[in-house]
Image: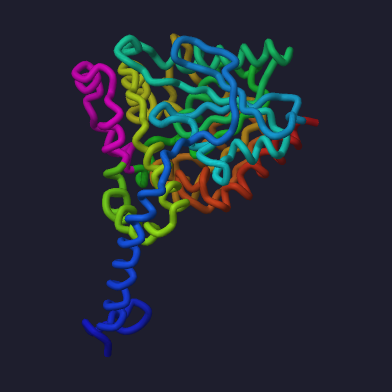
Amino acid sequence: MTAYGFDGPLAMTPESLANEAMTTQGKLRAALDTLHRVEDVHYGATAREEVWRDGKVVLYRFRGARAPTAKVPLLISYALVNRPYMVDLQADKSIVKGLLERGEDVYVIDWGYPDRSDRYLELEDYIQRFIGGAVDHLRREYRMDAVNLLGICQGGAFALCFAALNPRKVRNLITMVTPVDFHTDDNMLANWTRGLDIDLFVDTLGNVPADLMNMCYLTLKPWRLFVQKYVGLVDILDDKQAVEDFLRMEKWIFDSPDQAGEAFRQFIKQFYQANGFVNGGIDIGGRPVDLLHVDMPVLNIYAEQDHLVPPSASKPLGGLVGTDDYSELSFRGGHIGIYVSSRAQREVPQAIHDWLAQRSR
């Protein structure tokens, strides 16, 4: 019998508690030196250049160590709520770097930071004007009819809409942790928004503040995101590189743009509340979105432990699209781990590259 009556691997004894206290004390002493040496951190490890712009929205081309061998460019459409550089966080945690090393020609849309002048931007602007403008720029530059499109999270929902409305402009479509069925029981975020008076919400706030959005996401896992990760910080206080990696992730999390009010209203109403992909009724600039028009090859990548877009919300895509060439990839990890874990660096870029290569013939 050990202290407090516990046996086994979680047993606590006076000796183990004393050792833990001494270890923690050592970590805290080391922190004085570590924090003195920690440098300012930045995300975005790969060189890039601006190639097209529409207002605050910029299209960047990533530049790898060698010239791309892929003949068709790959355009990444990220979500609006965070900066798109989670796909290129740092040198050893970069899906972009992995794709470039395998010869892909990678571009990303940077949505910028909406302000009050963007209050009345609609989904049509983001999907047809901005994604469409970037796609048309690439079609002109490469003198081809269609490009490859990779949509991530909300950016995946936008990519599905764009592909349904403009199927001849998308050669291959990849969706990654993308919500499709917004009414699954295990989607807590969708359950929260279903009863929201979105008209009162947007009419009151105008643009939706980034801090409010971040608070909603953090409260989905309050113990993990408010307490546990900061307690765990003590364990790495003697490791300068680990502390800088932690701070880089924190900087990305809290560097969030405000949301353009009208587009936010439309997205919550048509996707979260009406479940428009499943039930129909999504309208983009007066045109209905029907996923049966998505007739190009589709690769749907989802994360098994995703608390924001659970697999049950993503997997229904296979029964809704019109293509006969539909594939799924299940990744063992979470919504963020699918970009930054060591497993993701090994598996995700290779899977995307192999899938595209098979269809380039």
269 or 209, nearer to the observer: 209
Identity of the residue drawn at 30% across and 43% down = 218
87 or 301, nearer to the observer: 87
Vertical placement of residue 355 versus 53, above or below: below
Identity of the residue drawn at 47% across and 51% down = 241
The x and y percentages for residue 77 are: 52, 26
Question: Looking at the rendering, in which quadrant would you find the N terminus?
Answer: bottom left
Which SS does the magenta portion mostly show?
Answer: helix
Vertical placement of residue 100 versus 19, above or below: above
Identity of the residue drawn at 31% across and 62% down = 29
The x and y percentages for residue 181 are: 43, 36
The x and y percentages for residue 122 are: 39, 14
In magenta segment, residue 29: no
In magenta segment, residue 206: yes
Q: Is residue 140 left or right of residue 175?
A: right
Which span of residues is magenta-colored?
Answer: 188-217
Res 200 → quadrant: top left
Q: Residue furthest bottom?
A: 1
Question: Looking at the rendering, in which quadrant would you find the C terminus?
Answer: top right
201 or 224, nearer to the observer: 224
Q: Is residue 94 left or right of residue 5?
A: right
Vertical placement of residue 178 versus 221, above or below: above
